[in-house]
Amino acid sequence: MKINCLSCGHNIHLDDAYGDYEGEVKCFACRAMMEIKLDQGSIKKVKLVSLVKPAAPEPSESEG
């Protein structure tokens, strides 16, 4: 089963063992967390729980 990340659109592949699953999954592309509910292999709910903000670039020593 594939679920598209609600944050970045990356395809998340879930094994057949997740056919009846309720909990969180993590997108490994953007690290966003989603809460999902699957019932008999069908998607019942997908909700974005948290986003990971990209780290701010560190100022280089040659600046300023």
Image: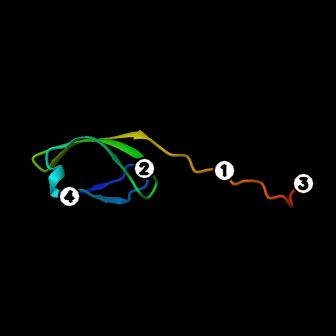
The residue positioned farthest toward the right in the image shown: 64
| Foreground disc of the pair 1, 2 | 1
Task: Give me the disc on residue 7.
Answer: 2
| Foreground disc of the pair 4, 1 | 4
Image quarter where the C terminus lies is: bottom right
Q: Residue at x 72, y 53 (%)?
A: 58
Mark 4: which secondary structure?
A: loop
Percent coordinates x, y for residue 1 in the rendering: 20, 58
Q: What's the distance in space between the residues labelled 1 and 2, CA to CA?
A: 19 Å
Of the image marks 4 and 2, the number of the one nearer the N terminus: 2
Q: Residue at x 43, y 55 (%)?
A: 8
Which residue position holds label 1?
56
Q: Residue at x 15, y 56 (%)?
A: 16
Q: Residues within 10 Å of mark 4 (few under 14, many from 20)?
A: few
In the rendered structure, which amino acid carries the disc numbered 4? Asp
Which residue position holds label 4?
15
Mark 2: which secondary structure?
A: loop
Q: What's the distance in space between the residues labelled 3 and 1, CA to CA?
A: 17 Å
Q: Residue at x 86, y 61 (%)?
A: 62
